[in-house]
Amino acid sequence: MDKIKALYLYVRYHLLFMLTGTIRSKAGVHFSDNLKQIAHLKGMYEGRRCFIIATGPSLRREDVEKLKDEITFGLNTLFLLYDQTEWRPDYYVFTDSPYLSKILDHYKIDVGTLGKKGVIFNKSLKKLKKLDHSLKIKYLSMSPWNRLCDFKYFRYSPDMVAGAYAFGTVTTVTMAIAQYMGFKEIYLLGADCSNMNQHFTNNVTDQEKTNDDAVKNATAQLKGYRIMKKILDKQKVAVYNSTRGGALEVFPRKSLEQVLSEDNRQEEL
């Protein structure tokens, strides 16, 4: 990358994003209904726990059905599971505009039904004309700076009104959102991080990437996970990986059965 391009990326995705983020946080929230909705999420679930459901091949229908009484986040193409279960996540997060554009070419999505309590999209998704924009959508300003500089000079924003920085995967962005909402325990499910070309079900986009692309994506995701762990550790937010297998070993493992059985023992006491 030449110096002129590097400077351009630094100014646009780092300096300007920080400046506009400050404006959004200090002033914009008073004028924008969208920012007011995001601000309303702050501390809503203080001290509670949540489950983030990713779309790795290990995900099972039976697992999500066990989480009907939990606060859950669904990601990306999780809606493809909806015809197999009555369970629905409380919140739905989608941040990849090109990816969603491909999905919308093949699937008709009723955005308003993706999450029971709300949907959070990358602000760039507002440009997708084929998306049926719902009043339940909250649009999050995001910067790709971390990925652009290969996480060498990473940035993190704890204030979702100011905006969020991409950390290699929608899962880590959702972890930042969960922190903003006050959760102190986060459990990951279906976060295999082992093959970027495979999901529990997705006949449209799976196998499109080369093996080299898949390796690059996995490497970027792991870097993002490691940084996010350090950030959330400092904020006293515990993250556990409840995924069945997979390659994500950044967070301590705790099986879904273990988590739920611990609840049953506490209730008995």
Image: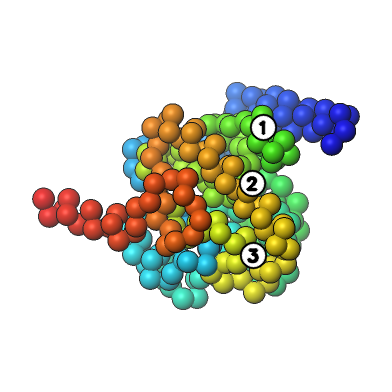
The residue singled out by tag 2 in the image is 220
Q: Work out whether mark 2 precedes mark 3 in sequence or the reverse, and give the earlier one.
A: 3
Q: Amino acid at mark 2?
A: Ala
The residue singled out by tag 3 in the image is 197
Q: Work out whether mark 2 precedes mark 1 in sequence or the reverse, and give the earlier one.
A: 1
Which element is circle 2 on? helix
Above or below residue 162? Residue 101 is below
Task: Give me the C-alpha separation between circle 2 and circle 3.
Answer: 15 Å
Residue in the image at 52% along x and 67% along y: 57
The residue singled out by tag 1 in the image is 152
Which element is circle 3 on? loop
**Percent x, y for residue 170?**
58, 50
Report the side of 250 relative to 156 (left or right): left
Task: Give me the C-alpha separation between circle 1 and circle 3.
Answer: 26 Å
**Crowd class of label 1 (few under 14; some 14 to 19; many from 20; radius 10 Å):** few
**Percent x, y for residue 229?**
48, 38
Q: Work out whether mark 1 precedes mark 3 in sequence or the reverse, and give the earlier one.
A: 1
Residue in the image at 63% along x and 48% along y: 219
**Crowd class of label 3 (few under 14; some 14 to 19; many from 20; radius 10 Å):** some
**Crowd class of label 2 (few under 14; some 14 to 19; many from 20; radius 10 Å):** some
Taking the image as drawn, is residue 159 in sight? yes
Residue in the image at 17% along x and 50% along y: 266
